[in-house]
Amino acid sequence: MNPEVVTVGETMVVMSPDPVGNLADADRVAVGVGGAESNVAMGLAALGHPTAWVSRVGDDPFGQLVVRRIAAAGVDVGSVDVDPDAPTGLYLKDPRPAGTEVHYYRAGSAASRLAPGALDAPRLAGARLVHLSGITAALSTTCRELVEQTLGRRPLPGALVSFDVNHRVRLWPAATAAPVLRQLANAADLVLVGLDEAQRLWHTDDPQAVRRLLPGPATVVVKDGAVGATALPRTGPETFVPALRVPVVEPVGAGDAFAAGYLSAVLRGLDPRAALRLGHLCAARTLAVAGDTAPPPDRTLCADLIDRSDQDWSALEPPDWSTPDAAR
């Protein structure tokens, strides 16, 4: 069966202190996998969408680990190439009270060799959605060409193309990234961007101003962390939904979980309010765990929470939706 959703980008092995704490003081580390696009793929698969992840990994134990973990999450990995001459990337998490710092070891990785044509396989034909991020565009010249080709030539005809800006300062400074990411985002059908990213890249802290900077997409979603998210269509009224309260264990991956929830709702034809709510629910689950991904609440619970009144939604607190018991 061909996938409904295709995501493309790098996934690395992740090492983080176990238990959660400063990396410099850790005696043990937990080993996992993490990458924006595969996080979204796993989230969408958990929400019931046949999803394929396209990438490259090294011919090494880390590459085997990455592919095995993502496949175990129900994602099609048949379009992942194994590179005999380049390694799988690695990153380390250093959780701190002021936020998690991330240390990358990815220069020259197998995924940095992704290039135009990666989405041309017949097995990907018929997908309804292709998801990209600005991270891929920063990895190499050929990776940027792949993103540009996907947004321009549209190798999967008829597919909606979503683009998460996902600016990573460690990969490229804001002054270099700003015009490139704006151009790429403006060529997508649907854009997700954090308000903090918009401030850093384009010097605006106003969702409406972000929308004016990106006139091309049908919808721009501006995320404002613990405050909430705003969906701004090209025509029609904007929709704001406040974020849910959750004790944050570790924030990495929450934006990808939000993207998975939001995109799932779009594919299911839900309205903007429901889409933003599902995004918040999935993000909240990930914020409550130490890993980059977490299973979403089950569909019955999601449907109930999405349909609550605005007053009831704003009053939700754990364990109504964020604990493992709530996902059963």
Image: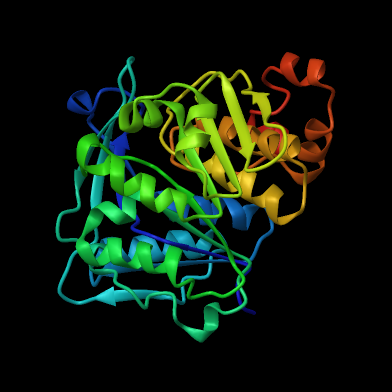
Viewer-nearest residue: 323 or 270: 270
Q: Position of residue 245 (x, y in %)?
A: 61, 18
Q: From where the camera sits, is residue 271 visible?
A: yes
Q: Position of residue 162 (x, y in %)?
A: 52, 54
Measuring 37% from the left and 45% from the top, which residue is drawn there? 182
Viewer-nearest residue: 225 or 207: 207
Measuring 59% from the left and 23% from the top, which residue is drawn there? 228
Q: Quick check: 243 left or right of 313?
A: left
Measuring 72% from the left and 32% from the top, which residue is drawn there? 237
Q: Name the quadrant of the C terminus.
A: top right
Residue furthest out toward the bottom: 122
Q: Quadrant of residue 323?
A: top right
Q: From where the camera sits, is residue 254 visible?
A: no
Q: Name the quadrant of the N terminus.
A: bottom right
Q: What colour scheme has been applied to the protein in the rendered image?
A: rainbow
272 w.r.t. 67: above or below? above
Viewer-nearest residue: 103 or 23: 103
Q: Quick check: 294 left or right of 84?
A: right
Q: Position of residue 207 (x, y in %)?
A: 52, 27
Q: Quick check: 267 left or right of 38?
A: right
Measuring 52% from the left and 70% from the top, which residue is drawn there? 76
- Total labels drawn: 0
281 w.r.t. 98: above or below? below
Q: Position of residue 318 (x, y in %)?
A: 67, 20
